[in-house]
Every structure is written in structure tokens, then in C-alpha cells.
Amino acid sequence: MIQVNKANKTFQLGDQPVHALNNIQLKIEAGEYLSIMGPSGSGKSTLLNMLGLLDVPDNGEYWLRGNNTTNLDTVPMDEEERARYRRDHIGFVFQSYHLIPRLTAAENIELPLVLAGIPPKERKARLDPIIKRLGLEQRAGHLPNQLSGGQRQRVAIGRAIIMRPKLLLADEPTGNLDSHSGAEVVELLEELNVDGITLIVVTHDSDLGARAKRKIRMVDGEIVLDKVNSVESE
Amino acid sequence: MRIQDQLLFNVRSLSRQRFRTLMQLIAMAIGVFSVVLLTGLGEGGRQFVVAEFSVLGNDILIVLPGRKETTGGMPPLTGGTRDITLQDAQALSRLRNVDGIAPLVVGKAEISYAGRNRESLIIGATPDFLTMRHLELQQGQGLPDIAIDQARPVCIIGSELKRELFAAKSALGQWLKLAGSRCRVVGILANSGTGLGFDMNNALIIPVASSMQLFDTQGLFRLMIDVHSLAGMKNLTQEVERVMQERHDGELDITVITPASLLSAFDDILAVITLAISAIGGISLFVAGVLIMNMTLISVSQRTAEIGLLKALGASSKQVRILFVSEALLLCLVGSILGIISAEILLGLARQQFNDLQFIAPWWASVFALFVSLTCGLIFSWLPAKRAANLPPVDALR
């Protein structure tokens, strides 16, 4: 589903060039559950942003297959094409939720459908089961500031999956949550993975990282460990 | 994105951030409000002066004693080298293209009736004066049709003067004391308001020869000539000047003016005033535009993260720009309409308060104000929205 060949990215931090991505070589199959770990500044978020088409490598290749069967080299794409691709194939969950404060929980979840120009009837048909699945029926009409952190992150997950993407990217999804609601969010993400979505989680939390079937460790922009946990697989 | 959803997105954005929206609405409304209100007030004043002059009609020449060399300024109202006499008036009345002539003598004198005294405006005139000034009688008859140099103790009184002197009693046929002499009321004017500074409701009109005796003068205050056809106006002006020059030993010491020329001089001044008022309004609109610019700039930069999010969710740069620009335009439109409505309400109240002043904002003021406000909104939301939309989404999200 994803293939990265010799991707590099350098930032200029003061007069010091930082190699955020150093010759990244990565292949991810559809339906995988992957965690990316590493110290701060190791380039794990940059990798995630590149995988999610929010950022582009300076050079190298990045092939991505969405819901259709053709592989696309995303590097030469322009921003508008990437935007369309993000809309149709990729869901994001951020540490700080990034909900729009003036929209209710249901409206936040519905937003990608609205942006994609889907008519209201179909929107409702897709929205209702997701709200139910997230257990937000009682909270659908509330604004984000009336929700708890765990509820907010569930709203964000709802928004990420409403376009039925193949790829779900989560950047520190439990970073702002207490352990209880963090565990709920992780369970929800893992359920989605079981349903077939490719899940990639960037985290500091070693417990969360260890739950993934495949673990990647990054240091200074390089992948230093890429281990598949086959023990727990059924 | 469907257009309905886009509007809904804008409306939600505006209606759920009430304070910010309210402040921006007020800023925009005040700008438009001041343009419409100020031009409306200026236009009302201009219309008032125009109406004052049009009481005279344009087919009238006014001959004043004295000569002012420069044209376009105010004609001399007092002084002069030589009087215009009744004989001059008679000579002029024999010219072709003259329908009627109204020599005027104007002064103030005390009148009294049954112990009530009033200082009043006295106008010495001929029957033609009433025709030229379109003065209607509510009772009685006009001035007697007598030779121009013949005095007779009769008078016509204004409606206000009649009320003050006689109250509800009949005034026709009563004798008034007028300075040292007496005169009999033969007619009462209908309510006609003011014109060219004469308050006709408080005036007393007597035959011109009587007024010359009363004020002991040979010279006329001015001479009004009713012109038969407008086409001959220019010729007649020269004719009048030639005849008067002949009669005054070759010296041209009179001024001939037409209400139209007087009016156009005033009209120019008033147009400049209206323009200046509009400029003041325009400046306030510009200030409001700057305010809108700042608030849009701030609100767009505050919402950079939102723009990043929208882009991460797959909105194109164009979509983001349209969302922010249409939000600003919606705001400007609503603000401008509020401004126009409140200005119109205020102008309406002003019209009720001052009956003779027609405070009506010219249509172009509203259109112009609306146009400027929308343009301000468009430019100043387009630029920051474009900048934010062009940010890489990963930067915008931070």
C-alpha cells in the first residue's frame, strides 16, 4: 500500500541543518498496525506528515495506493492534488484534537463530507452510525469545549474515518489524555484496524507503542529498528 | 463543496462568534451609515436652496441698481450710483418680449390695527408681481390695475400677518394704520412660505407708488421683468442694458441677473459642499475599511490552525480562500445594509422634523458605500486568506 524509497528531508534550524528524514526506506502493507517511536526531534512526526501528504520529502519516492488500485508517486503531485488525495484516502488524528470550536461534535465529524460536497441526505446516513459507534449520541449537539478530552478525541477519530479512508494516521493520539480515556481511544483505533484500516501511530508512550504489531524506532531521521511482533498475532 | 453548505459554514462562523461579528458589523455599518447620512443631509440642504430659487421661475430677469464688474459673485444688493426709477421701468416695459414688469420697493414699517402693533415687511409692487411670484390669494383681490406711478391706499396682507392682527375676524375692507398713513385691506395671501429671503406670510403688499411715498424714495430696490419667451432671454438682457445705459447718460450702472444664473452659482457651491460631505463620508468609510482589514487580518491569522485543518481534511486552497472571502463579504453586506437602513431611518425622522427640508440621500451614495465596503472586504480578506491557504498544511497546523 505504501512504499517509500530513499526519502530525504532537511530542515534549516538556525545555521544547523537537521536531517529529519535520512534515506528512509519503508514498505507498509494494507491493514497493518504500525507504531513509530523515538526521541523528540528524531523525525517521526515528519515521517508521519510525509506519509499523510501534509509534507513532501526533498527527494526520493513515495508511492501510495488509495482506494483504487493504481499506485501513485505522490512526490511530484501539486498541493491541490495532494489535498484531494488526503480528503479521499487519509484520516488524521492529532494530539491536540484540532476540532473547530464553534461547530458541534456532529458538525465536526461531518465536516469532511461537507467539504467534499456530499449531499445532506447521504451525510446523515454516514454520520449516524459513526456517532453511535463512538458512543457520542448524547453529546452530538455539544460544542468541543463542553466535551471531555476523551470525547473530543473520539470526535476527531469520527471525523478522520467518515470519508472511509484506507489509511489512518495518529500523532500522539493519547498525549493529552488521562490513562483511562487514553486506553479507550487506543481501543477504538485498534478496533478500526481490525476492521481493515491501516493504522500508523506516532507516540512517546512505550506502552502504546508496544501494542502495535509492527514497531519502528527512529533516531536522527533514520529508521534504526523495524520489528514485526508476530507473537501475539492469532 | 455545495454552495448551501458553504453559506451555512459562513453563517455558523458568524453567528457563533457573536462578539467578533458584532464588532465588525458595527464598524462596517458606521462607515456606510455616515456616507449615506452625510450625503443625505447635504443633498437636503441643496434641494432646499434650489426650491427657494425656483419659486421665481426661470423666465424672469432681475434688474438691480449698481454694477459689479466681476461676474459669478453675489450681485450687489445695496448701494449703486444711480437709482432705477419708475420712468425707467415704464421704458423697459415697452420693450419687445416683455410680458410684465414688477418694480419693487422693500422696507420695514410699523403697522397697527385696533391697538395691535407689528413691525412688518412692506413690499411696494404692481399686480404683475403676484403673477411672477405665483402668489395666490385666499380672499379678496389683487392690487388694483392702476398706472404705475399712481398711489392708492390699499394693501394685501400675508396669511400670518392676518392671523396676528385680526385673529379669526374678517380683515377685508378694514383700515390699517401704516406709519403716517392708512390703507385698506383688499386681499389676503394664501400660505406660501418664503422665497428669496422674503417671508411672504408676514408681508404687506401695497402699490409701488404708495410705497415710494411711504419710504420717501425715488429709487427702486429692484425690478423684475417677466420674459415672454425663454429664447429671447439673452437678447432682452442686452436690450435692457442698452436702454438703461441710454437713459443713464451712457453709463451702465445696473446689473441684470437671471434666477437661473444665480441658481447655477449657488448650485456649484452646493455641489462642492455635497462633494465635501461625501468625501467626509468616504473617509469614514475608508476608516471602517481599515478596521475591517485589521479585524479580517487578525481573524484569519488567528484561524491559521483552522485553515491548516481544513487543508489536512482535503479542502483545496481555492476552497479555503472562498470560505474566508465569502465570510468577509457576507459580513460587509449585512453591515452595509444595516448602515443604509439606519441612515434612511434617521433621514426619515429628519424629514418629519423639518418639513421644508427634503433630506434624501442620493441613490449613488448608497451604491457607492456598498461598493466600497464590499471591495474593502474582498481585498482585505482575499490577501490574508490567500497567504494562509498557500501555507503548507503542516505549517498552518502548528
Image (tube, rainbow, N blue to C red):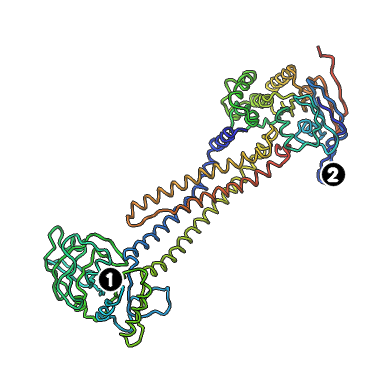
Q: Residue at 64%, 24% (x, y): give it.
A: A151
Quadrant into which the N terminus of chain B falls? top right
**Which numbered circle lies on residue B235?**
none
- Residue B134 appears at what percent x and percent y? 27, 63
- Residue B127 appears at what percent x and percent y? 22, 69
In the picture shown, does residue A54 fall above or below B149? above
Q: Tell me the SS state at disc 2.
A: strand
Q: Residue at 41%, 73% (x, y): give it.
A: B73
Q: Which residue lies under the disc numbered 2?
A: A16
Q: Which residue lies under the disc numbered 1?
A: B99
Q: Amino acid at mark 1?
A: Asp
- Residue B198 appears at what percent x and percent y? 28, 67
Q: Nearer the viewer, residue B128 or B277?
A: B128
**Residue furthest to the top:** A234
Tell me how many marks there are. 2
Q: Tell me the SS state at disc 1.
A: strand
Quadrant assignment, res A129: top right
Q: Amino acid at mark 2?
A: Gln
Q: Residue at 13%, 63% (x, y): give it.
A: B172
Q: Nearer the viewer, residue A139 or B372?
A: B372
Q: Nearer the viewer, residue B126 or A180?
A: B126
Label 2 crowd (10 A; few <14 / some 14-19 / many >=20):
few
- Residue B175 appears at what percent x and percent y? 12, 68
